[in-house]
Image (tube, grey):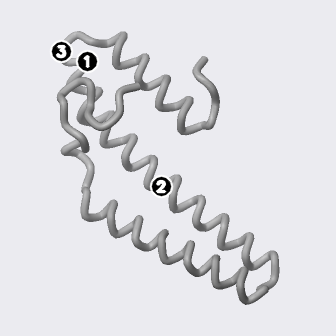
Amino acid sequence: MASGRCRHHGKSLSLYTDRAALLRRLRRIEGQVRGLQEMVEGERYCVDILTQVAACRAALSRVALILFEGHLRGCLKEAFQEGKEEEALAEVRELLDLYLGRGAV
């Protein structure tokens, strides 16, 4: 998978992705992670820490899904319109493998 820019149109972030909203979410996650550090330093109850870890994971998953949707709506839609269906489908498989933490199938 190419890094840095979309292999279909050369842009780095889909026009269908709200960059400002994404950055707000990431800043909120950053604050949650700092809170986790403070909880560990303060020797808080394990269940409370694990609850916050789960919240951070869910928030990161939401960021990934927003990015994935933007990529589907923009980059991959363009690829299909240009007749590059097989290339686009291969990229979707790669992205799903990456997101799901599996090796390439």
Give the percent coordinates (x, y) of residue 10. 19, 31
CA distance for labels 1 and 2: 25 Å
Residue on which the image places disc 3: 82
Instruction: Give residue 53's quadrant in the image.
Output: bottom right
Q: Which of marks 1 and 2 is nearer the N terminus?
A: 2
Circle 2 packing at 10 Å, graded few (<14), some (14-19), many (20+), is: some
Give the percent coordinates (x, y) of residue 28. 44, 73
CA distance for labels 3 and 2: 29 Å
Q: Relative to the observer, which residue lies in front, 77 or 64?
A: 64
86 vs 19: above or below: above
For the point 44% across and 47% down, which residue is it? 65
Which disc is residue 96 wearing? none
Where's the C terminus, which quadrant?
A: top right
Residue on which the image places disc 2: 62
For the point 65% across and 73% down, which residue is it? 52
Amino acid type at circle 1 is Phe
Give the percent coordinates (x, y) of residue 46. 81, 76
Give the percent coordinates (x, y) of residue 15. 19, 44
CA distance for labels 3 and 1: 5 Å
Amino acid type at circle 3 is Glu
Q: Which of marks 3 and 2 is nearer the N terminus?
A: 2
Please, which residue is most extreme toward the right here?
46
Residue on which the image places disc 1: 80
Q: Relative to the observer, which residue lies in front, 74 or 40?
A: 40
